[in-house]
Structure formats: structure tokens, C-alpha cells
Image: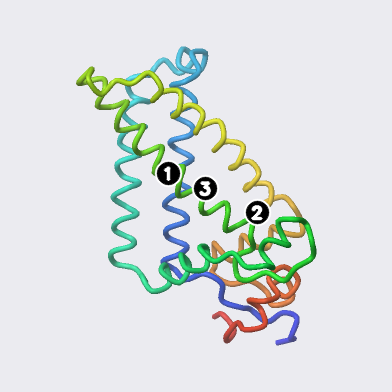
Amino acid sequence: MATGRRRLRRFTRTERAVHWVHATAFLVLLATGLALYLPSLSELLGRRPLLKSIHVYTAVAWIVALVFVIAVGDRRSLRATLREIDLFDRDDRDWLLRRHAPQGRLNAGQKLNAILTAVFAVLFAVTGVLLWYGERDTRFRFAQTILIHDWLMYVSFFLFMGHLYLSVIHPKTRHALTGITRGWVYEDWAREHHAKWARGAGADAP
């Protein structure tokens, strides 16, 4: 195999499972949330109670699935990823300032995206529980809860569209999709976009 076509293992099965569980649930929650939020869509579909049930049970399934994957999967790789996300060095700061700087397995933008995704997930869960429980007990019905939930949806939608563009359309970065679907990326691409990680990466991926 030519050096330029060497495959480097980027993500474990557990890391990929966490990503796709979250991504799948997010898409269902976003679609049903938009349908519930926009009266025209609700009227067009005409099944608001069903959409509401799908929205709620998808949120429950999302949490259960994440707990299951973490419980039975490779927790060591997840801990290593968390440590990597938590570390911002000078190269990361330079990258955010649009200076050319070598990046690790995750660049600074991906680290920020992961942090925002986790924060938004917690806020969605908390406000979602309050909205659900507030319908059953008015003591838990707060005026700002629906506003926070809606604004989280708006911001998440635009972050998702940016993420989708970079991972599927943008020619320089779309090869990253191979890493989160098959677990590996080509070495030549990694050396261009994640030079610090590529220099110390291990053996070829299967």
C-alpha cells in the first residue's frame, strides 16, 4: 500500500455508536419539534398528539441508548476522548484565530462543537422534562422554559447545518465522514488536517 493511502484508525466502535445514537435521536427530535412548534406543519400533518408522543419517547430512548452504549462499550476510549476535548492548547487557540496550526485528532472547532452539543443536550433534557411535567403539575410550569427550549432548537438547527455542510459537502473536510462511519481516515488527509495526531498515530486500520 502506498504511504499516501495508508489508513489511520480514528474512532473506536463505541465512539461511533455514541455519535450515531445522538445524531439519530437529534434528527427525530428536531423534525418532530419543528412540526410541533410550527402551526402550519402541525395542521398539515394533522397528528399533533402522535408527534408529541414520538418526540417524548425518542428523548427517553436517546438517554437509555446512550447509557447502554457507555455501559457495554469501550469506556477507556470515551474517557480519552473527553480528556482530549477538555484540553485546549496554544495550537487550538491559534486555529480558532485562523492561524495555521497543527491539530490533534480533534481540531479546536470539533472540540467546541462537542462541548456545545453536550451542554445543549443537558439543557434540552432539563427543559424538556420541565415542559412535560409542567403539563401535569402547574407548579413546574415556568414562563421561560419553552423560550429556552425553542432557542436551543434554533441554535442547534444552524449548528447542525454547518456540521452537515463540513462533513458531507465541503470537499476539504468531507473525508472526515469516513472516520465516524468506518473508523479510519487516510493518512495523507490526516497529515493535512490533523498533523499532530497523524504523526503519532498507530497501525493501519483494517
- In what element is the residue under mark 2? helix
Asked whether 60 or 159 is in front, the reply is 159
- In what element is the residue under mark 3? helix
- In what element is the residue under mark 1? helix
In this view, which residue lies farthest toward the left?
137
N-term mark: 3 or 1: 3
| Callout 2 crowding tier (Cα within 10 Å): few <14, some 14–19, many ≥20 | some
Q: Quadrant of residue 18?
A: bottom left
- Residue 149 position, x and y percent, is 44, 29
In three-dimensional space, the C-alpha distance between marks 3 and 2, rounded to whole angstroms, equals 17 Å
Q: Quadrant of residue 70?
A: bottom left
N-term mark: 2 or 1: 1
Q: Are marks 3 and 1 in contact (CB under 8 Å)?
A: no
Q: Which mark is residue 121?
A: 1
N-term mark: 3 or 2: 3
Residue tagged 3: 116
Asked whether 116 or 174 is in front, the reply is 116
- For badge 3, the amino acid type reads Leu
Residue tagged 2: 167
- Residue 186 position, x and y percent, is 68, 74
| Callout 3 crowding tier (Cα within 10 Å): few <14, some 14–19, many ≥20 | some
- Residue 181 position, x and y percent, is 54, 62
- Residue 116 position, x and y percent, is 52, 47
Residue under the image location 56 percent in, 72 percent down: 10
Q: Is residue 199 above or below residue 121?
A: below
Is residue 107 shown left or right of residue 115? right
Is residue 160 shown left or right of residue 148? right
Q: Are marks 3 and 2 in contact (CB under 8 Å)?
A: no
In three-dimensional space, the C-alpha distance between marks 2 and 1, rounded to whole angstroms, equals 21 Å
Q: Nearer the viewer, mark 3 or mark 2?
A: 3
Residue under the image location 69 percent in, 68 percent down: 91
